[in-house]
Image (cartoon, grey):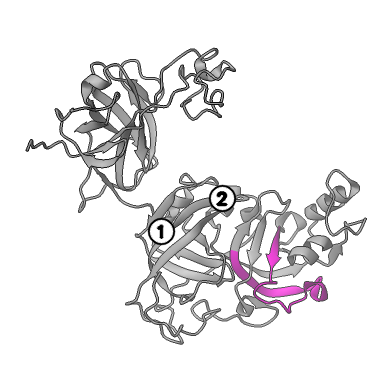
Amino acid sequence: MRRCNLGWIALAAGLLPACAGDTGDLPPGPLGFRVALTGGDPGAVDARLPFSLEGATYTLDIEALPAQAFREGWVSIRAQPGDVLSVDSPGAIRTNIQLHGGRATGVRVTVAKLYGDARIWVEDLGFVPGPAVGSACRNGLDDDGDGRTDYGSDPGCAYANDDTESEGSHAVGLSPVLYYRNPRIADVQGMTSVPPLEGRSINIDAGDMVVTRVSVDGLYVTDISETRGYNHLFAFNFNTPAGVRICDRLVTLGGIVGEFYGYTELTYPSWTRDLDWPRPEHPTPAECPVPEPVEITRTLLDNGAAMESLEAGLIKVSGGRITPRFEDCDFNDNGGIDWDTPEEDCADECAEALDCSELTQFQTYGQFSIATLGATAAERGKIQVLTREAVPDFDALAHAGETVALIRGTLSQVEFLDVPWILEVRCRDDLVLAGPAKPMHEACVGPVPPDEDYTR
């Protein structure tokens, strides 16, 4: 029996070991590719490279198997997980290169957003470069007679300038593993308004992650060890998470990164609670290191980047005033604001005024506005507040115009609203009409769940 040491070659039919020279009666086209790493730091399983949005460059030698079956073919290069920023090889077109004699050497690939056990992939998509206009995938014709025409409809069209509607073999080859650390919460947030890992499945296993809120549809987590900001994240669970409470520490937090009207979240989340972390009924500050909320001011509200950095984090308004006016802009009583009508003008005017909450918004969603402290109108800002979930019996209308000692909770946003920032109260402890408030290590901390060994 012939032996070989090419590693694992990803064949069109699956991941199978392959030996160069075992050609036999093979079908036309490559069965896979050997991808050798000849330059760049791959890290190691016990010395992983840091997650980074910047690019790292690797040099590859690529060989089709068998080479004679794909002598002048084109291959696409991508990373999983990660993004290919550029490919440097003679004649390269974006992330596609041509093999000559079934081989390409010294291919320089710059990749970013690598995490976990990453690999660089090489795949035969059937791409044959053609003109930008008039190629087989952009000529309005069903060239291969499969009932589908051109790029976007025909799966054989890898790009608009693909000069054949025929699919490739989809044979692939994998580089050796590139060992990277998983992203932290701030990396998932991306230190900006658009999460760089949107749509990707991630697992966070670093940082000091503390649960700061448990809601009817998920949980909120802050990495209290993070110094860069953007260290808060909401995990949308569709229902109330079981077996977890405020104060709990998480060892892992995973899910699919999403953006919901400007609000970054994890969907289909999973998490593992630190089972060694003490869970007393009445925790001390050290046992419940929930951070102090950030005071919202007009200056902060005017700084979009600063507000983004607090997304899903704890905030508060001290001595704020519930708007004295609840303006009904639903003139035709249809239960909503009709845009491009006087109703929209009314709602816009109310949103700009410090003393106004729009009544339809309050009746439909339970949201009302509160003005922050300030000596003058120019120093006062306005933020929306949501209490219906946590304190359903609180009637903001009955308290219109009143000054409230403290309102605190988590920060969310709905980017298309005129007042996009929303303070969501966690429980009754966060709504203090008068008098002192409970300290953070006690506020909204529920009893220890009975299932002590619960993990997800």
Q: Residue furthest bottom?
A: 281
**Which mark, residue 226?**
1
Left or right for 254, reference 406: left
Q: Residue furthest front?
A: 25
**As displayed, is residue 330 above or below residue 78?**
below
Q: Can residue 113 be seen here? A: yes
Quadrant position of the N terminus in the picture: top left
Circle on res. 335: none
Determine the residue positioned at 47% across, 70% down: 211
Give the spatial CA distance, label 2 vs label 1: 22 Å
In this picture, is 355 found above or below 155?
Answer: below
Instruction: Answer with the quarter of the image where residue 402 lies.
Output: bottom right
Secondary structure type for disc 2: strand
Residue 81 place in picture, x, y as percent:
37, 43
Label ID, residue 259: 2
Mark 1: amino acid: Glu
Image quadrant where residue 412 sits:
bottom right
Percent x, y of residue 343: 88, 51
Work out whether mark 2 precedes mark 1 in sequence or the reverse, and give the earlier one.
1
The answer to whether marks 2 and 1 mark residues whose Cβ atoms lie closer than 8 Å is: no
Residues in magenta, as a range:
382-410
